[in-house]
């Protein structure tokens, strides 16, 4: 008798082999474990701390325990005190100027990078993010050395004969805004670059075919389609600019405070945790409003439909 198995029989038996259920179960187990780690991380390090900050903002200051009952709204009422309101408005103005400068510089920069060759795009974006490889505090001290009266900038301008006296930039509002722009500029460019890369050329060509000039094409086509990137960039620049207290400490002195300086002083110096928490909640609410505006703008231009057409 011949016990040799024919090739057809072997292939049939191989085809009838059941699928590796263990692999599917293992994949599902890995997916569940990953989701569990992500949710646990968000709950422990994001949700719970924010809940604690919100709860602390309604409590009363205590010299021994930092926080105590009763529950009160006095911390939020203090935020409209003329002293703190002036600091908040001053901080908002500096953060607003920083955001406007980053937008005016970042919008054309992101557009030009998106229109460059692919190899140059990668190089330019790499040069943009290289500063992130160095600690921001170290880079800020380098900026301080450049802005100082006897620093690199003043020395260079004096040697070129453009000025006769050293520039008095350090410890001014201009120095704070300059430091904020230097640190936050990439956060404006990255979301703008993303929307410009996704911007379809046929929309621009259709606008030209309909008789629109360059200004009309920009105003009615390019600007609305890039609005989510603008709002996202504003979200990533405006609120962090209000909270980067170390920039004001190093470059601005005591006359150019940010909201972050108030929060830091309340937690570390005055030991008024409830009031510091209330100021933190105020910044969180501002961020929530910007996120809502971002989602509304994405829906308004039909971002989902745009992706489906693409």
Image (tube, rainbow, N blue to C red):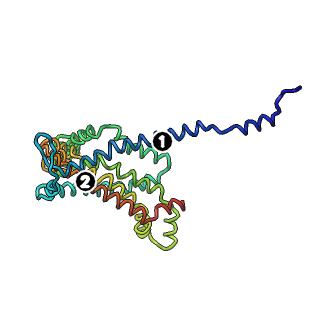
Q: 10 above or below 53? A: above
Disc 1/disc 2 C-alpha distance (Å): 34 Å
Q: Quadrant of the C terminus?
A: bottom right
| Label 2 residue SS | helix
Residue 265 in percent (x, y) is at 15, 45
- Name the residue nearer the viewer: 131 or 284: 284
Q: Residues within 10 Å of mark 1 (few under 14, many from 20)?
A: few
- Residue at mark 2: 283
Viewer can see residue 166: no
Q: Which mark is residue 32?
A: 1
Residue 178 in percent (x, y) is at 24, 49
Query: What residue lies at 37% left-to-right and 40% top-to-bottom?
Result: 130
Give the quarter of the image for residue 230.
Answer: bottom left
Q: Quadrant of the N terminus?
A: top right
Give the quarter of the image for residue 222.
Answer: bottom left
Query: What residue lies at 77% left-to-right and 37% top-to-bottom?
Result: 11
Q: Between disc 1 and disc 2, whose residue precedes?
A: 1
Q: 75 above or below 216? A: above
Viewer can see residue 75: yes
Taking the view exactly as shown, the residue that stands out farthest to the bottom is 211
| Label 1 residue SS | helix
Circle 1/circle 2 CB separation < 8 Å:
no
């Amino acid at each position: 008798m011949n016990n040799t198995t024919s090739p057809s029989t072997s292939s049939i038996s191989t085809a009838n082999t059941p699928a590796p259920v263990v692999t599917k179960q293992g994949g599902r187990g890995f997916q569940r474990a990953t989701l569990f780690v992500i949710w646990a991380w968000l709950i422990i390090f994001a949700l719970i701390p924010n809940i604690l900050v919100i709860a602390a903002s309604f409590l009363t200051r205590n010299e021994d325990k930092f926080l105590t009952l009763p529950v009160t709204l006095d911390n939020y009422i203090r935020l409209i005190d003329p002293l703190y309101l002036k600091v908040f408005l001053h901080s908002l103005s500096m953060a607003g100027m920083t955001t406007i400068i980053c937008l005016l510089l970042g919008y054309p920069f992101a557009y030009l990078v998106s229109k460059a060759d692919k190899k140059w795009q990668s190089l330019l974006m790499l040069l943009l993010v290289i500063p992130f490889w160095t600690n921001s505090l170290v880079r800020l001290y380098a900026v301080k050395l450049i802005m100082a009266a006897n620093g690199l900038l003043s020395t260079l301008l004096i040697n070129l004969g453009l000025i006769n006296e050293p520039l008095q930039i350090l410890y001014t509002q201009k120095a704070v805004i300059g430091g904020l722009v230097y640190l936050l500029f990439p956060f404006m460019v990255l979301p703008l670059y993303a929307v410009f890369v996704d911007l379809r050329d046929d929309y621009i060509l259709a606008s030209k075919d309909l008789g629109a000039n360059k200004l009309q094409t920009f105003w009615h086509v390019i600007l609305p389609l890039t609005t989510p990137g603008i709002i996202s960039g504003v979200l990533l620049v405006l609120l962090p600019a209000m909270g980067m207290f170390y920039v004001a400490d190093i470059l601005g002195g005591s006359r150019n405070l940010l909201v972050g300086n108030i929060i830091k002083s309340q937690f570390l110096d005055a030991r008024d945790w409830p009031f510091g928490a209330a100021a933190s909640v105020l910044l969180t609410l501002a961020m929530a409003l910007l996120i809502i505006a971002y989602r509304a703008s994405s829906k308004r231009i039909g971002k989902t439909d745009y992706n489906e057409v693409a």
